[in-house]
Amino acid sequence: AKERLDEEGPPLPYECWVKPATRFDALRLGHAAPPFAEIIARNDSLSDGAGRFVSAVDPVAQKHFPASVENGGWVWAEDKKDHAGWIAVPGKTGRIRFRVNVSKGFVGLGYLETYTDVGVATCRLGDGTESSFDSRIDEHVSVTGMDTLSVEKEDETLAEETVECWTDGRKFKIISLQSC
């Protein structure tokens, strides 16, 4: 059985599921993204050549699942038909950042779990604790994993925070974020 690499974090509150402050969900977009294999073959990534963060170039991704990417380390693509998401490019380093609204200080991170050719991502919400997630599982299936990021908040006033993730240089696919 797969285990989270760090201490078990808090569960995602029920409120985050029914009334999220921010919800990005690649599977609900109904938008065909470029095939991941073709992007890798063309080495077509989001980089300005200077290692700075740049915004998504896909108009649907920018509107419905916006992110900023460092060093071309992540691309908006589908690795399976009709299954888009933000995918870390194997062999590249770089971070991805998402702006989310939080009131309670929680974000649910949905990602691909599968049995081959995937790695570990480390993520943090605002100045909260870093959490590492291993997307490799033993079963010969591909499923959605969900883990929680959190940050201390003094009150429940809605505030913008940043979710930042980076990988161990292997593929990792983020498919949803929802916050409260």
Image: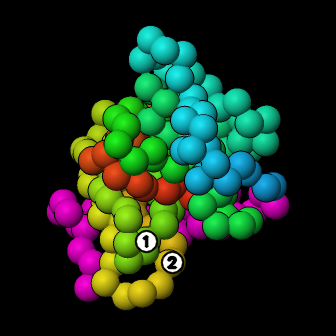
The percent position of residue 150, horizontal first and vertical second, equals 36, 50
The percent position of residue 177, horizontal first and vertical second, equals 55, 53
Residue at horizontal 24%, vertical 74%? 3
How many marks can you see? 2
Q: In this view, does 44 lie to the left or right of 29?
A: left
Q: What stretch is highlighted in magenta?
A: 1-30
Dot 2 and dot 1 residues touching (CB under 8 Å): yes
Give how far apart the Cα atoms at labels 2 and 1 are: 5 Å
Q: Determine whether the residue tagged by mark 1 lies in a helix, strand or loop.
A: strand
Q: Name the residue under label 1.
A: 113
Return the mark for residue 143: 2
Task: For label 1, count other residues whose C-alpha is less than 10 Å away and answer few (under 14), some (14-19) or many (20+).
Answer: many
Name the amino acid, label 1: Glu
The percent position of residue 178, horizontal first and vertical second, equals 57, 55
Q: Which of 179 and 3 is in front in this view?
A: 3
Residue at horizontal 60%, vertical 38%? 42
The percent position of residue 25, horizontal first and vertical second, equals 66, 57
Residue 30 at least partly seen? yes
Residue at horizontal 35%, vertical 43%? 91
Is residue 81 covered in magenta?
A: no
Residue 166, quarter of the rendered image:
top left
